[in-house]
Image (spheres, rainbow, N blue to C red):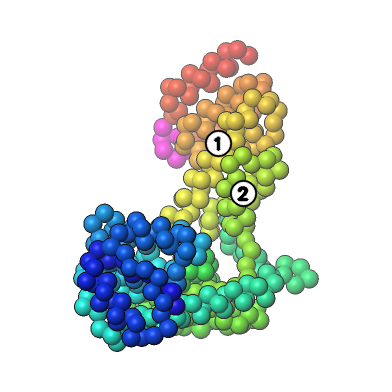
Amino acid sequence: MRVLLVDDEEIALEVLERMLKKIGDIQILGKYTDPEKALARLKTEGADAVFLDLEMGGRHGLQFAQELLCMDSSPGVIFVTAYSQYAVDAFEVDAVDYLLKPVTMTRLERAVQKIEERQRLKRIQKVQSNGNKTNIWIHSLGAFQMFTEEEALVPMRWRTKKGKEMFCYLWLNKEKPVNKYRILEELWPEVALDKGTALLHTTVYQLRKVIKELQIEDGLQYINDQYVLNLPIKSDLDELKDLLEETNPAPEQMKRILELYEGDLFELDEYNWCIYERQSLKNTYLSCLQKYAEKNRKEFQNEIVEKCMQKMFKMDIYNERYVIMLINYYADTGNTKEMMEAYKYYCKVLWEDLGIVPSRKVIELYRKYIKKE
């Protein structure tokens, strides 16, 4: 196992090095008191694990660990610190373990075992991803559905609603192990710990039965108090995210972007734990449509531009900017009928939902174009 040690105290580094050498089969790549130099080394050479202090002056350990998550092959992080108050935050950045100083040999050996189990899990995932044909398709934008690909797409049947929810939760974490206590907080927030744990075990049992029907071994794994979903899956969400990363999407790509977003993420399933992810995706999507529409709006009678504006208008109708863009576009293309219908619909929604009328800016813009007719 290749490891890096990072601590702003040289004595702490020396003590940790001596302790790790007693365990054996560990190659210490380097010891650093400067986190910037350690980060640069990791970005060029990589490592299996990093033993990391939290309070290091220039850069906090949590910030350091967050940057590691952005690496293609991020090392496991074991925090070694004198501060207990960061334990919860540590697992938010996918920490493998959290050791309080002074560290005992027994506790250190357990941390190393956790790293070894993490490596074993990665090897299993690599073998399965190379050996398994992707035969599962997930539709998550709008109504959630999971299909298996046989002769045709066959929808999966869920034994329980909670089993379906836990699957969605683990899948959205994209093969990252999730601590069981975090799952309990998200899926059973108002249930006592003992009862929540029993419900979690029942749900895991049901979910494993569903996965077993897919004829995939170790599809749901439990290691170091963490669950991870390991299945060959393709989805509308993954395809959409790939397309949204295009800086200058081609017309065919924009058509596909418009098709894919049939609704918000898990729209019909009111999962509170995905509110941020849902809104973030929606904002990114609207920004993509807006950029494309603004860049190509002078191409009159452009069907894709018109569909972008219409979708922006419907998805965020209270956004005055989208209304103005659509009115201007219809006016420029001489489509007075559509302009009038859009304006009337906008007025209707504002009045029925909020009890207000459009702003003076929107009213005057609309009247300006109507007078020209």
Q: Left or right: where does residue 36 sit relative to residue 134?
A: left
- Which quarter of the rendered picture does the C terminus lie within? top right
Q: Is residue 286 above or below residue 27?
A: above
Q: Residue furthest right?
A: 151
Residue 270 visible in this rendered orientation of the protein: no
Q: Position of residue 102 (x, y in %)?
A: 21, 78
* For discs 1 and 2, the disc positioned in front in the rendered view: 2
SS for callout 1: helix
Q: Left or right: where does residue 46 sit relative to residue 32?
A: right
Q: Position of residue 348 (x, y in %)?
A: 51, 34
Q: Left or right: where does residue 21 sit relative to residue 55?
A: right
State the extent of the magenta-drawn residues as a range.
350-356
Q: Which residue is mark 1?
A: 290
- Which quarter of the rendered picture does the N terminus lie within? bottom left
User: Mark 1 and 2 residues: CB-CB less than 8 Å, in contact?
Assistant: no
Q: Which mark is residue 243?
A: 2
Where, by quadrant of the figure, is residue 47 drawn? Answer: bottom left
